[in-house]
Amino acid sequence: MEYVCLDCGARYPGDSLLYTCPQCGGVFLLENLDFSRLKERDGAAWREVFDARASTRDTALKGIFRYYELLAPLLEEEDIVYLGEGLTPIVEAAPALRDKVGLPFAYKNDGQNPSASFKDRGMACAFSYLKWLCRRHQWDEVLTVCASTGDTSAAAALYAAYVGAPLKSVVLLPHGKVTPQQLSQPLGSGATVLELPGVFDDCMKVVEHLAENYRVALLNSKNSWRILGQESYAYEVAQWHGWDVSGLCLFVPIGNAGNITAIMSGFLKMLDLGIVAGLPRVFGVQSEHADPVWRYYAAPEGTRHWQPVTVTPSVAQAAMIGNPVSFPRVRRLAERFVEAGGEKAFQVVQVTEQQIMDAMIQANRHGHIACTQGGECLAGLINARALGLIGGDERAVLDATAHSLKFAGFQDMYFNDSFPPEYGVTPDKSLANRPELLLPESARRGRNVAEFARMGAEAVVERLGLKKK
Ligand SMILES: *Cc1c(COP(=O)(O)O)cnc(C)c1O
Ligand SMILES: [Zn+2]
């Protein structure tokens, strides 16, 4: 395998630990030099291989590496790290929610990955690669470093803790800008957790400086091995739909733009190998508080101009990024996507903070487990429908990129109407939900269990207006 620089076209062998192009600083995509040999099998044969692996007991091929040949076929089986990532469920929208939105859709619950976000897909690949590399070069210590909006560090710390020596994990977080749950994850995994003032984009600059000047393995999504692992999302979506993705619209939140890059790359590979006959349509979604990619594509072709933005606080905190490092990859892959799938194959929609919160709350009241970014996807679908970008005869798959529990604090703010003004969110008060204390603490004191049970039951009966049977 080789790294290919998207800026200057330089190529480097896959067994060197590279993050960005040493010549020009550009981002890489990884290329399998033997990719054309994969074409010796036709699409149907590949579909059979992947379908047969669904029943394997071989853990190396159970997770994202079910699609081993499409990901990183230079790895040895002994290096593959499997923590149960991938193969996340695709859950149909509850009927009442589907009727509200006006077309069939499903959530793919990537929050059901081991560290509760899709980042595990990329980390499983990056850590398998690092293990392989350490063995090959007999390195005795490698410091893995990442900046994070919360989930990258949770995933990196988890995989580093599992693999153990020679890998050690350091994570760099913007102080006060990750949720308490996300902060607890790298702490619990034993990583060194360092915080700096500022936002994610600031931490990213620090980490890049380290990567350029010191011996560290950077695990941000500029790391092309992570992108490879995240392609598994596309393979799973196609396989779930019986490898027929026509009429499918995927909604993906864009932060650093690694995820949407990986998903498009995965579909293009499948198309190339005849595993799928056509492409789905891909919709990126961005909040108006962090929307550089939306701005770029909102301009007519020919007048587009790349310009990072300064972010303002967003409930879609994991995607609150003004200068996405993978933008050059998005531009390249979107071009190829549109070439192969038509001009409507790749689009970006913008949503408000209010819409994100309303959508997340609605989704979860209908039995889903959407995080704020999952809410962002639903808000994107609703807007795309209103703008006529998607028809009632199409089907959408929304990426619930993390588990709702990681973002419980935003739900609290919604229920308690306590959003700081910069978010610009006014809750729908009719949806507020709070625990109700039925009896004072003193009611328990001095009563035996039977007495208290009767008293408690009476309080419940009164509150609910229960009738005797
Ligand atoms: C990282 C992350 C995103 C953004 O993904 P990118 O690859 O950075 O575009 C969205 N949602 C969640 C929950 C994330 O952790
Ligand atoms: Zn270059």
Image (cartoon, rainbow, N blue to C red):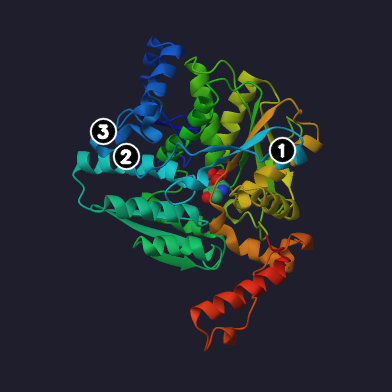
Cα separation, mark 1 vs mark 3, equals 42 Å
Amino acid type, callout 2: Tyr
For mark 3, what is the residue? 77
Position above or below: 365 against 423? above
Q: Nearer the viewer, mark 1 or mark 3?
A: 1
402 lies left or right of 383: left
- Label drawn at residue 98: 1
Left or right, residue 446 beside residue 457 = left
Q: Is residue 161 visible?
A: yes
- Packing grade of label 3 (10 A; few <14, some 14-19, many >=20) is some
Q: To which residue does mark 2 refer? A: 129
- The amino acid at mark 3 is Glu
Query: Which residue shows up at 70% across the image and 55% down it?
Result: 357
Estimate the spatial distance between the alpha carbons at disc 3 and disc 2, rounded to whole Å: 11 Å
Q: Position of residue 232 (x, y in %)?
A: 46, 33
Respond yes or no on whether mark 1 lies under 8 Å from ligand 1: no
Task: Say which label, 1 or 3, has the lower sequence index.
Answer: 3
Residue 450: x %, y % from top left: 52, 77
What residue lies at 52% left-to-right and 89% top-to-bottom?
446
